[in-house]
Image (cartoon, helix red, strand yellow):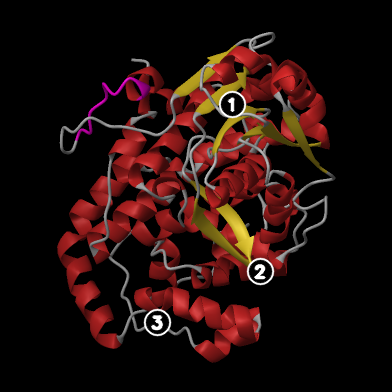
Amino acid sequence: MDMIGELLAGRLRDPQNGECLTVPVKRVVIEKSLAQSEADLITGLDLPAPFAVVSDYNTYEALGRRVESALAGRGVISIRLPGRPHPDEQTAARVMAAGAKAGSYIAVGSGTINDLTKFSAAQQGKRCAVFATAPSMNGYTSVNVAITMGGHKKSLPAVAPEGVFCDLSVLAAAPVRLIRAGFGDAICRSTAQADWYMAHRLRGSAYRSLPFSLFADLEDAMVEGAGTLTRGDSEAIGVLTRVLVLSGFGMTICGGSYPASQGEHLISHYIEMMGSHDDDAPLHGEQIAVTTLVMARLQEALLAGAPPRLKASSVTLAGLTSHFGDALGRECMVEIMPKLLTETQADELNEKLERVWPSLTGDLGRMMRPARQIEAALGRCGAPTGYAGLGLTHDFFANAVAHAREIRNRYTFLDVAADSRRLEPERYIA
């Protein structure tokens, strides 16, 4: 079944309640080539001109020049960001200032360009579309973006692009690091689903199986084709692209990043918040490849044998401000306070764990992909599998694993490990 087509046509139903699903994206085009059709694709969306076309120097050369040339007769405001732009409030302000007189925005790029464009459009009440330049992340069709505000990486609401256009010849020619990053961002389905489902069973948070059913038939093919992704194989690139697009739709339908961003993303966010911001910094998807493997190992360790015994959370404001600095530490404390356990809450959860452990481990076992399979697939496409492959030091990465749970109110296996005094980074980062 063409899940993307069915979803856009409004014919796909939620398996849990039978309701027809709707998404704000009007059109997704994934073809071997979109040459000579760029203007028609935008015209078909009836976006108001002039168009603020957002790219960086690399994405401009990959596709931006072509898009701007195709739209030149309709009015173009070229916003070309230098170097390797960062998705932060300062860069977003620059985009919004440059696009203040635009009728709509068009992103030509992948992760950072996509997030900055969707965020800017949302802030200014404008519409947008995106021409992808790499199969490097799953945010093309989502309504949330990752923006650093005041040094704190946050998931913020944005507008969805009304059109997502993927020229597979362009995507297949993307730098191999970006393709590997996309595979890393897609392979985290396993750990993210396990974290989200566990939080639902233990703490009663919302959970939906729908996001994962959207690309369940494609994931195995994506993993099997990992070794051909960086060889210009358009079929493998097409499968990866569809998984990423559908993963983004899952986030949109759920109203947040929950289906695709859990413990593995918390570790990655820590790296981005506390690490280097120079051009040699690891890509987001490269980080997710490594942190997914860490979370897979951690989840398997905690699920083996008897249920963990939880204790009151040991996080303190003094500890957070000492580690993150005063302002960020206080912000983290406010953010995570709702998920920290008192002794009474720990006792209640321990009773629940005893009751639900057999069914919980059974359910999780059916949805999780073994760590050894994840590691093998990452190896086949040449993605990093350890902190050294990210250019990080052992101590920094160990701190990332140890402190990632402290930056956001999202209950994951990192919290279970920490509150059972089993969060031992050395066991999982080898």
Which residue occupies the foreground of this view, 347 or 254?
254
- Quadrant location of the C terminus in the rendered image: bottom right
Q: For residue 358, which quarter of the picture? A: bottom left
Query: In the rendered structure, which disc, 3 or 2, sits on the residue that comes first in sequence?
Result: 2
Which residue occupies the foreground of this view, 39 or 107?
39
Residue corresponding to mark 1: 226
Residue corresponding to mark 3: 313
Q: Which residues are magenta?
A: 8-15
Let me know if residue 14 is in the magenta part: yes
Q: Is residue 353 left or right of residue 414?
A: left
The amino acid beneath tag 2 is Gly
Q: Is residue 351 left or right of residue 320?
A: left
Q: For residue 357, which quarter of the picture? A: bottom left
Residue corresponding to mark 2: 151
Query: Mark 3 falls on what kind of element?
Result: loop
- Quadrant location of the N terminus in the rendered image: top left
Crowding near the residue tagged with mark 1, few <14, some 14–19, many ≥20 C-alpha atoms within 10 Å? many
